[in-house]
Amino acid sequence: SGSGNMHGMPVGLHIEGMSPAVEATSNIPGLNWMFTESGERKIPQLRADSIVYVGLRDVDPPERHLIQSLGMKAFTMHEIDRYGVGHVMEMALDHLLKDNPDRRLHLSYDIDAVDPM
């Protein structure tokens, strides 16, 4: 994060391909549990294509670059406005379930996604 704020970044610590960014966290107090004594990762990793972001609003250029370069699926609010939330969710689920329609899914809901009219 350019701002240095860690909130909103937990999933990034578990994504395959984020090694340089994750290894940089090994010196942050309180995050040493993620590494062995020799500095190797000991936390589980997620494949980037197993993550779908829905409803992105403000994405910093470095974040946008990572999402694209790692092959993560992402839908912005522009796409929700264009296609409707139902269709966007169908596309997200199609992406996640294409290889294994019986796989388990985890949904994380960010309260910041609620738009106060």
Image (cartoon, rainbow, N blue to C red):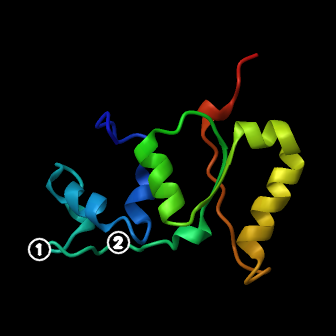
Q: Which mark is residue 104?
A: none
| Residue farthest along the top direction in this orientation | 117
Contact check, label 2 and label 1, Cβ < 8 Å: no
Q: Is residue 83 above or below residue 48?
A: above
Q: For the residue labelled by badge 2, is the local secondary structure a helix, a strand or a loop? A: loop
Q: For the residue labelled by badge 1, is the local secondary structure a helix, a strand or a loop? A: loop
Give residue 21's position: percent from left, percent from top: 29, 58
Indicate the quadrant where residue 90 lies.
Answer: bottom right
Give residue 98's position: percent from left, percent from top: 77, 78
Q: Amino acid at mark 2?
A: Ile
Q: Residue at x 59, y 70 (%)?
A: 49
Indicate the quadrant where residue 4 lies.
Answer: top left
Q: How far apart in space, not on screen, are marks 2 and 1 (Cα)?
A: 13 Å
| Residue holding disc 1 | 37
Indicate the quadrant where residue 107 lies.
Answer: bottom right
- Please tell me which of labels 2 and 1 falls first in the chain: 1
Q: Residue at x 45, y 42 (%)?
A: 61
Give residue 2's position: percent from left, percent from top: 32, 38
Give residue 71's position: percent from left, percent from top: 56, 66
Query: Is 46 on the left-hand or right-hand side of 18?
Result: right
Q: Residue at x 31, y 67 (%)?
A: 19
| Residue holding disc 2 | 43
Q: Residue at x 65, y 34 (%)?
A: 113
Q: Amino acid at mark 1?
A: Glu
Query: Is 102 on the left-hand or right-hand side of 11?
Result: right
Q: Is residue 49 above or below residue 32?
A: below
Q: Is residue 72 above or below residue 85?
A: below
User: What crowding class fits label 1: few (fewer than 14 Cα within 10 Å), some (14-19), or many (20 or more)?
Assistant: few
| Residue farthest along the left direction in this orientation | 38
User: What crowding class fits label 2: few (fewer than 14 Cα within 10 Å), some (14-19), or many (20 or more)?
Assistant: few
